[in-house]
Image (cartoon, grey):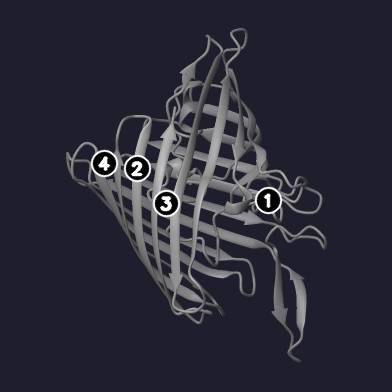
Amino acid sequence: MNIRLKFAGIAALAAAVPAFAQIKVNDSLTVTGWATGSYQYTSPNVGPSSDSLNLDAGLLQATLTPTTAKKVTAVMSVYYRPSAEGGVSPGGSEATLLDAYVTYAASDTLNITAGKFLSYLGYESFYFNQDNMITLANQQLLAPIPGYHEGMKFDYSPDKTDTMGAAVVDSLYQKPGYAATEGDGGLRHQAGFEAYYTNTAINNLTLWAGFGYETPTKPGFDTGGITEEFNAKGGVIQNSHDVYVADIWGSYVLDKNNDTVVLEEIYKDGGYADKGSNWLLYYQYNFTGKVSSWFCFSGEDVTDGASYVKYSISPTYTYNSSLAFRLQYSYTDYSDYSIKDSNYGGAEVLFKF
């Protein structure tokens, strides 16, 4: 989810939240937001084609820095994702409180955060307006990248090129049915841990490595740790399995035109049918200051399960700092899956303020 933290006192918080412009209301309060809408069409070789025309998601966020407590910053956001896009929660609401955390700048190099916040893991962003394409390169089958959870994290930047952090959270993965917007809400039946390290010592090169661990889930509290395994007689038994996730990615700016190449490899082990890897290769070419395109070669491979390879192209026209238009075409080739291949096309409008 492409969270690259750079710290300089409280200003560090700006890098830990969605990177878009903020409107200053007064000396203590700023607000920001974004929304994306798209038309998407998918045609698999087996089964009917489908399409959608939706507001995909929207977010309104407030950042409060009290004038009487300059080292403390609070962030809250409301996130909307229609049920047509898989965003409805078990309670029936399409809107949810997404970010809800407080950060204390203990020093110029250390930030301490408590509340509800986004996972460190993953190059691709949770936020629709920050993704390189309309769809993610991966996350179809294995879905190894966590979303939001609650807990405490510590982020430390000893110098200008090194940043590291660690978090203890209620669970690594989401509460069932909540579309990655929150964890399971407790530690006594499960807990999650994350850590990362990033380095920018080499000019134009960013290297990032992270690790996540989720303890076995007690019965009745499934957040992705429960897996199905087959016993010797062929019957299905439910097992609670701990989950390990390792993620490494690097991005390199090739030239003065800011053309960029990105490589990522993710490995997840959550037990039977929940074990395997994701990978991606991104290349961005900037035709002009307003027109650019991402080219992506990606795939997922589930051990004892299905796999696929995906080829994508996604050009973007940036009208101004608030408005952009994006297209995408992808071809996906599946193995050991209900369909053999699929074609996808989409057009998206992105708005932010």
Q: Amino acid at mark 4?
A: Asn
Tell me: residue 201, above or below residue 39.
above
Q: Earlier in the sequence, mark 2 or mark 3?
A: 3
- Left or right? Give the position of 225 relative to 281: right
Q: Nearer the viewer, mark 2 or mark 3?
A: 2
Q: Residues within 10 Å of mark 4 (few under 14, many from 20)?
A: few
Question: Residue sitting at 35 percent across and 56 percent down?
Answer: 328
Q: Earlier in the sequence, mark 2 or mark 4?
A: 4
Q: Is the residue under label 4 in contact with that under label 3 (CB below 8 Å)?
A: no
Q: Is the residue under label 1 in contact with that under label 4 (CB below 8 Å)?
A: no
**Is label 2 in a helix, a strand or a loop?**
strand
Q: Amino acid at mark 1?
A: Tyr
In the picture of the structure, the residue carrying the numbered disc 1 is 178
- Image coordinates of residue 61 in percent, x first then y, are 56, 28
Residue 165 visible in image: yes
**Is label 4 in a helix, a strand or a loop?**
loop
Tell me: residue 22, above or below residue 99.
above
- Left or right? Give the position of 229 relative to 206: right
Q: Nearer the viewer, residue 206 or 91?
A: 91
In the picture of the structure, the residue carrying the numbered disc 2 is 325
Q: Is the residue under label 4 in contact with that under label 2 (CB below 8 Å)?
A: no
Residue 135 visible in image: no
In the picture of the structure, the residue carrying the numbered disc 4 is 204
Q: CA distance from mark 2 to mark 4?
A: 27 Å
